[in-house]
Amino acid sequence: MLKKNKLIIITILILFQVLAFISCQMKENDKPSDLGQLTEQEKLVIQELNQWLYRLYGSPLTLTDNDLISFDQLKDAKLVALGEATHGTKEFFQMKHRIFQFLVEYYQHKAFGFEADFAESLFFDDYICQGLGDLEELMKTKMHFWTWRNKEVKQLLEWMKDYNIGRSEEEKIHYYGFDCQYTTYQTEFIQDYLEQAYPVLGDTAVPVLEQVKNFSTDDYRDMTQRTYNDIKSQLESLENQFDENKDLLIANSSTREYEIHKQLLHTFKQAFIVRYHSANFIVETDWRDQFMAENALWIADFLGQNAKITLWAHNGHVAKDPSYGGSGSMGHHLNQELSNLYQVVGFSFSLGSFTAVGQDQYGNYTGTGTHEITTEPQKHSINLIFHRALYPNFTFHLDAIPANSQWDNWLNTPRPFLSIGAVFNGNPSNYYRSTDIRAHYNWIIHFDRTTASELIPQN
């Protein structure tokens, strides 16, 4: 009798485990089997797409090197750009962390370039390379963008710092910003440098920098074209004086210090140009994306002729899109310069939560918080195709898709693709953009359901 009871108990336990396993699998997949509302072509596209997917299991940070083996095909790229479909998605940030780690450990990437201010980034590079400062306090007081002030980016920066422990200066990895929207910190850095390296030039440079640093948006709006041209000429003159006195500046500091402070002055001038054009709604040229491309190339060159770096920015900036902003995205400019040595990984999602600045029906901003999309992706969109694919989370190589396949033919026409930046008004349909993803990206990473990034409060 005891043996019989024991057998029954074991059988029940086995059944319970099987049911639990099936339940977990269903929860993980959580994919609709109904292919209604799809055209016959879309159904064929999904069937074909399922053959090319590399499935991603679990949290991005728990992915093994073997899980990322498909990204071996990025090994020859000089610049690998990692996008994001929102500025506030945990899974996107963690996946970029994990890919960067893979590229550092296997393909000697030397820096993570961020959609962030260059001068600001120097505080964090000092933390990563020298352990200077308290990271959370730096994030609260030095970061301009709330988008990076979160636990996911903090975890990345902590990993970078730990990686550098015990390594030589040549072996260390770096964090540099390539954006150019602020004039906050450059003046102080440049003033301190010139006081040591060439005080006479400091006497000329600092008054000009201080004047521009204190300009408000209204100052830019009220600025005449003549005043703009005059200040721009003064900033260009300061750059020329850096060039003309290069040998003296290096002799009184170092080549590295000279190059960094020259770049600080250069990004200061860029920010002046960007802020003037933005304040006056002059949109013929997207100076910001053009400058970001220049700065990304500068980072790679600064770290050595053969240096490889990773870039972090929104899908729109990293995409190889010649029409973005009217004169081309950052990725378009980098693709023109580097061709196949520039590789782009776009990110997408279907449902779930993310962090964004809210916006009401009148266009007023309502503060930063968690938002959620609960409705199925827009009809005939790329996101709906991904939502109906076999796996919930996956990556695939767009460049490897055969010509004249169902997928290739479907993408001959640009399709709606969900793209949310830092602001969300609650209506997902307003954020689908007609996109040629095969022309804009080399890889896609899709998370079907996402969660919001965890912000670090400033108070």
Image (tube, rainbow, N blue to C red):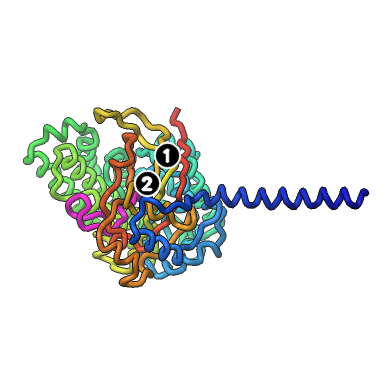
Residue at image point 41% right, 65% down = 48
What residue type is disc 1 on?
A: Thr
* Residue placed furthest toward the bottom: 403
**In the image, which residues are magenta?**
311-330
Residue 9 as seen in the image, left or right of residue 43: right
SS label for mark 2 = loop
Which quadrant of the rendered structure holds the C terminus? top left
Residue visible at 91% across and 52% down in the picture = 3
Q: Is residue 234 left or right of residue 321?
A: left
Vertical comparison of 370 with 405: above or below: above
Residue drawn at x 20%, y 40% as measured from the top left: 275
Residue tagged 2? 377
| Residue 319 x %, y % | 30, 56
Question: Where does the image place residue 167, in percent across and percent down from the top left?
Answer: 53, 59
Residue 439 or residue 193, whichever sits in front: 439
Secondary structure beneath dot 1 equals loop
- Residue annotated with mark 1: 374
* Position above or below: 436 against 122: below
Camera-side residue of 273 and 14 = 14
Q: CA distance from mark 2 to mark 1?
A: 9 Å
Q: Residue 328 lies in magenta, yes or no?
A: yes
User: Residue most toward the left?
Assistant: 226
Q: Is residue 89 magenta?
A: no
Query: Image point 44% across, 47% down: which residue?
Result: 126
Q: Amino acid at mark 2?
A: Pro
Residue 299 shows in the view: yes
